[in-house]
Amino acid sequence: MNDLNDDFFRHISSEFNEELEALRRSILEMGGLVEEQLRAALQFYSTQDSSLLSKTDEIEKKINAAEIDLDEQVETLIVRRQPIASDLRLVLAVSKIVRDLERMGDELEKVGSLSLECFMSGSDVGVTEIQQIAEQVAKMLSESLNAFARLDLDLAREIFQREREVDKVYQSALRALATFMIEDPRNIGRILNIVWIARSLERVGDHATNIAEYVIYLVQGVDVRHPAVNQNSFE
Amino acid sequence: METIVSDSMVQNTNQVEGRAVPEKTLGEIQVDNPRMTARNVNVFYGEKQAIDNISLDIGMSQVISFIGPSGCGKSTFLRCLNRMNDTIDICKVDGEIKIDHQNIYDPAIDVVSLRARVGMVFQKPNPFPKSIFDNIAYGPRIHGLAASKVELDQIVESSLQRAGLWEEVKDRLDQPGTGLSGGQQQRLCIARAIAVSPEVILMDEPCSALDPIATAKVEELIHELREQYTIVIVTHSMQQAARISDRTAYFHLGKLVEVGDTKQVFTNPKHELTQDYITGRFG
Amino acid sequence: MTDRTYQRLDPQQAAERVKASINLRKRKETRFLWLGKTAVAIALGFLVLLFAGILSKGIPGLFQYYVTLDVQLDARQLDPSGQMTVESIAGGDFDGAILTSLYEALGNPEGRKAKREARRLISSGSSQRLMSYVLDNPEQLESMVSIQFAVDDDVDTFLRGLISRETPEADRRISDQLIGYIDALEAEGRISYEISDYLFFGSASRDAEMAGIRGALVGSILTLLVCIVIAFPLGVATAVYLEEMAPKNRFTEIIEININNLAAVPSVVFGIMGLAIFIVAFGMPRSIPLVGGVVLALMTLPTIIISSRAAIRAVPPSIRDAALGVGASKMQTIMHHVLPLAMPGMLTGTIIGMAQALGETAPLLMIGMVAFIVDVPAGVTDPGTVLPVQIFMWADFAERMFVQKTSAAIIVLLAFLISMNAAAILLRKKLERRW
């Protein structure tokens, strides 16, 4: 499938090639920003260094700027190049990935501020569970970005696997957190916030799955979202 | 034939499906440091007016495209810029067109030297029925641009290289130009135009007779040429205008409706007529 | 506006109607095809008849009967002064030498009447022939040489079988005695049937056996040269002016109409005009190729102009645009691009016009080229005649041999015309450039 990657940049118009290359770079950069946010949270869970989380605000601003810039790039590409076939799928996929990345950024901002509240006090109840989820989700995010960069279908499919894993971890975390709440009702407020953190992280995982779906669309031209509606299988 | 003209009829004469052609052109007519300027240009074919009071700047080292429905005057206006309309007897041009602050219709200006500064590429490729070498060499020869045979060879080679044709024809320079494919012929005509070192190149629908691959090659060539030359291109294809031009001018019934940055014209045109044309609601 | 509602035919009905009409259409087409074929066949048939007639009469005209005699070249008899120049030889007795050898070949006939008859055997131009032989081969003096002399035209006619022995002697141009001599020479194998060198190298003459077209041919060539030198540049320049540079006004229109009409004017009128202007008003000599050429040029000019204009118009405007776009001036565009491309058409038109002019008789008759010119014209101001006029004149003469020679001359003229047309076709093929 790497041939498709080369094909993208073989237009007779060198300007078109440059524009597509710039688009790819921009989206991968935006992905990188989101990864940075998640890494900051992970590091915080292991080191309890609150300064890490102050960066999330800055990164959030950059992510929003990137969203606007990428949307404009997409608009320009459509107006000037009228892309079709694989070019069109690339542009449409990018446009959708931008949205998912931006939503990830929002969720991670919530994660950041809530984490600061819940784990500042030194109490580490629930940290392990959150860490577990966060690690899995971090892997999913990096895999989804790699799958896009390399247009790697196998990698994309692995993400679907990992989603099921994350689901299991998430469910067990919720059970554990519920137990904590029953054990010590004074903790309920705090534990509830931890539940929101878990949910946000799980959402980030969903968005990473979406990215994987877009990669499959981009490479194969098959829409694999909502399998109940869609008759196509994704093999 | 007398018709009784009522007020309502007068009001509708300039309207197309309810939209009036604006009195004043929308967008930015002027640019900083223009290569050519046109002010208040009117063109008549006998009694019929083809161009109505158009003013426009052509920016240096830029590509500007003229778009508009058939018969709107874009080709006529293009041909004013290098005085090709002089060859048509019934055509009358008034107004001011300047290149580097010189009025091109000034009697002191020799139209032959003007056409060496403002070159033209036509819709149907029209190489001379001579060898490829002679096709390119003809212009420099008659204008005395080469002092020796060696210089002439250099001019021919560099023109063909800049047109992206050198590799394809370097071994057959003595063969007739008419033996090339359509796309190659058009690139040959472009090479011929740049052989006389013009400042401006006018192109009248240069790709309309070419297949998509040849068109893409010519467009890539235009993209490369823009650094050294100012290019004015008339095109029927809006997609082409969107792809290759920096500025776009929309003509309608002999008037200039709107001119501006290409991206802006195609994403958010200022006038309804422009929007209707580019979205295919009429024309 | 009609108010009929149009019932749309369904495809099946339409197909049936088409089928029904097909037979009628096919028959019409077949009829038309056969009409065309018949017309072509008739035209070809007439052409074949024409050529058959000309060739059957003319080919014999290319040949002549000769008698071979052994002549003793006696230096004292032929070149008394011994200087071997044209003047000194003129005093020699060539007739004597020839007659001597003739009498010998005939077995030395006795008596003045017999000798007179014998003399009638040979052409009166024989002495001229012997003279040129001696001048060309002075080393042969004092030896005996075999030379072919032309027989007299009546003898020639007899030998062709056109004078019959059965006709009573009084009605014949050839006496029995002469026939006897002829038979004797034939028995010795001295009579031969050869390509006529007189036809091609001789000039106009009252004696049919000596008559040739050389003078007329040279005259034709000179006249045509004058015609082409005047008509081609003028015609081309006029065509270029009218097509490229003349303003489109009333005056130009009038000029165009006049030129087109001139092409239809009968050629005789040009001759009368030439007579009135050049010969009467300017006082130029009659019957010279110069005047003939000018008259023909004026006659051919409209043809050349019209075909040149068509050739120029056929050059696509895109070539002109391309040249102008690169910065060529109007003249440069015309000289470098339009003319070279129009040249094949112009040349073809010119050659066809020349071929027409070659065959013109009437206007040249009017300016007096009917004079009997013996010498070959050396330049355009020497009196001369042209081939068609020569043919015209020969057709008038009584001797039978002239009939053959006339047809032979017609063949030469036709050959000339055909080769000019062939040249036109070749030239066009060679110069044609695709654009």
Image (cartoon, coloured by chain):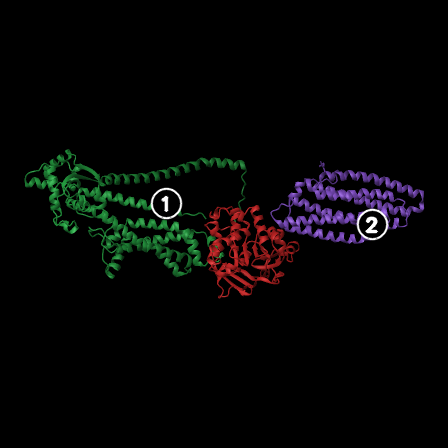
Chain colours: A purple, B red, C green
Relative to residue A27, is residue C132 drawn left or right? Answer: left
Residue C24's place in the image compared with B280, above or below, is above
Relative to residue B115, is residue C335 drawn left or right? Answer: left
Q: Chain of mark 1?
A: C
Extreme left residue here?
A: C111
Q: Which residue corresponds to mark 1?
A: C426
The image quarter containing residue C55 is top left
Residue C141 on image: x %, y %:
15, 44
* Label 1 neighbour load within 10 Å: few <14, some 14-19, many 20+: some
Residue A125 on image: x %, y %:
90, 45
Residue A100 has which mark? none
Q: Which residue corresponds to mark 2?
A: A110
Extreme top residue here?
A: C187
The image quarter containing residue C187 is top left
Q: Nearer the viewer, residue A131 or B72?
A: A131
Q: Residue at 44% across / 57% down in the picture?
A: C332
User: Quick check: can you spot residue B113?
Assistant: yes
Amino acid residing under circle 1:
Leu
